[in-house]
Amino acid sequence: MRRWRIAALVAAAIVLSYMDRLTLPWTLTQIQRDYPFSDQIKAAFDSAFLISYGLMYVGGGRLLDRLGTRRGFLIVMVFWSLACASQGLAGNYGVAPISGMAFALIMLIVSRFLLGMGEGGGFPAATLAVTEWFPVSERSTAMGIINAGTAVGAVAAPWVIYVVLTYTGWFGLAPWRWVFFVSGAAGLLWTVWWHRSYQPPELHPKLSQQERELILAGQDEHDRAGEEAGARRHSIPFRELFAHREVWAIVLAKFLTDAAWYFYMFWLPKFLMETFNLKFSAASGVGWIPYAASGVGCLVGGALSSRLLARGMSVNASRKIALGFSAAFMPWVWLVPSLHSLGLVIVIFSLAFFGQQSWSTLVMILPTDLIPKRGVGTVAGLVGMGGALGGVVLGQIAGYMRDHGFTYTPILIIAGSLHLIAFALICIVIPKIHRVDFSQGDYQPA
């Protein structure tokens, strides 16, 4: 059916976004041979991405609310693909170090900042596409499929990078530069597919009348009212959004849990190589497994919530049961420091990655449960910003601690606790998940 093709189209963009953001973590050892740097510089690369990613997550959400999904997603994909490719241009170019840092490293920091700016619109666009194309009963399943793109991208990244590193080096350029060029080019090709394929369901020329009626009938009254209001979009003001504790709760929950996720995502390759003295080929040979488990988590979390809804449970119960199930997998990483088997460590990280992405799928769908359609992109952006800033905080802590002689143990203890705290926060602050009333706000069109 057409709506599931749309889910696959959006999932492909998420695949590319995760490949793009993982190009640097998996090429660090190659880049370091040309331009040496410390763990705190490595943390600076991550923070540059996450700061702009978080801030532009909000900007991207606002952009999507105003421009619409089709035009907005096209713009952000072009921007982040060019930013990804720009990392391959990093070099000193005869410029002296600035404050002791090689100019090439500064260029990488700037490129990561620009990449974050572009990718900040990705998940708000995905959330809006789900809101437009799926009835409420199918949204968590659709978001699970789309969020599984994170795992596909993360699993593919080390293999694709290995191939590029092994078989390129054209025109006298270092192979690690081609990793960024190839990844950026793939994103630009996706924009052609998107431009030719995506329209909202009420305008899509190839959508059957039966499926169109199913989609529109399955949206709630707030979404339908938004469609009937006309083509011009009116976003809900930030002051209206922040007046509701539900918005604060999901933003803070994402801050806590994505702190753990970004630490795992950006530091796992380095952790495996350092802890078990692995070369790139060996680390990439097993490093993809936790990311594959995260993809299963995406599908399981979304499908579980949809299944509970189909059996007659409320949105509140179905979402919270699935969230609690997801959070229960996270504390297992507390065991990692005591393990000396690479296989067992991979199993534990796989459990954590599974739980994290099951959780993330459900948290990303909460804005569609709580917020009218005209504010979904903005709230999704705020949620993403919270997550990115959490990643900055824990990433900087990790970089500082590693450069000052600490092991990974205290960082893993913190990371393994955050989902439990976030789940308790959601249950306390949002005792019942239901549509928040914005009817008194001044954002409504005349």
Image: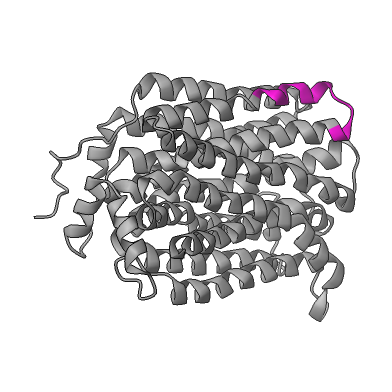
Q: Could you tell me if residue 347 is visible in this image?
A: yes
Horizontal side, residue 407 vs residue 426: left or right:
right
- Residue 330 drawn in magenta: no
Q: Position of residue 402 (x, y in %)?
A: 75, 32
Q: Position of residue 325 (x, y in %)?
A: 56, 27
Residue at image location 19% in from the left, 39% down from the top? 438
**Residues shaded magenta:** 331-343
Q: Quadrant of residue 107?
A: bottom right
- Specify the farthest residue to the left: 446
In the image, residue 170 sits, relative to residue 383, either above or below, namely below
Q: Position of residue 340 (x, y in %)?
A: 89, 27
Q: Nearer the viewer, residue 90 or 229?
A: 229
Q: Nearer the viewer, residue 113 or 341?
A: 341
Q: Could you tell me if residue 68 is visible in this image?
A: no
Residue at image location 69% in from the left, 70% down from the top? 182
Q: Quadrant of residue 128?
A: bottom left
Q: Position of residue 388 (x, y in %)?
A: 52, 42
Residue at image location 36% in from the left, 52% down from the top? 131
